[in-house]
Image: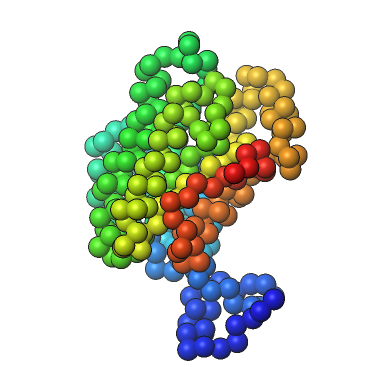
Amino acid sequence: MTVEKGGPDATDRMEAGVTGMGGLGLGGLGLGGRVAVVTGGAGGIGSAIAADLASLGARVIVADVDLTGAEKVAAGLVSESALALALDLASPPSIEGFAAAAGRVDILVHNAGVSIVEPFVSSDPAGWDLMWQVNLRGPMLLTKLLLPGMLAAGWGRLVFVSSDGARAGSGGEAAYAATKSGLFGLAKTLAREAARANVTSNVVCPGPTDTPMLRRVGADRPGLVEKITRGVPLRRLGTPADVAGLVAYLCTDRAAYITGQTLSVSGGVTMH
């Protein structure tokens, strides 16, 4: 292992980063002074993302249609300036009001999502509309409102949480996969359009993850969770922390040269 011992800016980078590895400075991982929005922040993965971003020094705005849940998450963060705001991604007026209340945003993590599990041939188009609104149209509208501030500032991070179900297909989730896969094209296009302003745009795809949503689905299908777990090469379900770690990293300066990418956190279920 090579340890950087000097250089005119080595000290500054260490102070701006995180100290670990037995006291060695690992620069570029701090988010002090940054404002981060996490949509779906009251949920399992969302709350873990919010916690990791706050631990790196960001001021986190926890956004969720469940304001009470968002407030609980915000109250538990290490950041004393954490804030909870209501956000209904199915409602353009709610999105506009949220953007106005949030103000300057440096990091936007699109984590919210809704899934209705049912065979495609018996699915209800009303459910398609809801998933389209929350999973794709909502993120597009919110990004359109907040991205100009990042472009003007010359720094920003966009992270879209999609799903390996969208990347590889998932039985019973045709509309969900269709709407979540739309984030791939959106993120890549924004990566190209915003690159000159040092704004990166990436997608993170969780694989089988132990969340309340999965447990609710599993409650109606005995043995489903166990069957999914057996199919994971690492022989366990993912945790919200597994996903949050990658999302948080992509928001730091250490990931400044990573943009336009789709990365899976799946325990080896999908390998690309």
The image quadrant of residue 150 is bottom left
Residue 35, x across and y down, in percent: 38, 60
Residue under the image location 48 percent in, 29 percent down: 177
Residue at image position (25%, 55%) is 148
Residue closest to the eye, 225 or 191: 191
Residue 220, by quadrant, is top right
Q: Is residue 22 left or right of residue 194?
A: right
Residue 222 to residue 162: above or below: above
The answer to whether residue 131 of the structure is visible from this angle is yes
Q: Is residue 51 above or below residue 41?
A: below
Quadrant containing the N terminus in the rendered view: bottom right
- The residue shown at (39%, 22%) is 128
The x and y percentages for residue 21 are 67, 72
Tell me if residue 113 comes above or below residue 217 in the rendering.
below
Residue 5 position within the rendered picture, expressed as x and y whole percent measured from the top left: 60, 87
Q: Is residue 239 left or right of residue 96?
A: right
Q: In this rendering, would 200 be left or right of 27?
A: left
Q: Which of 240/253 is in front?
A: 253
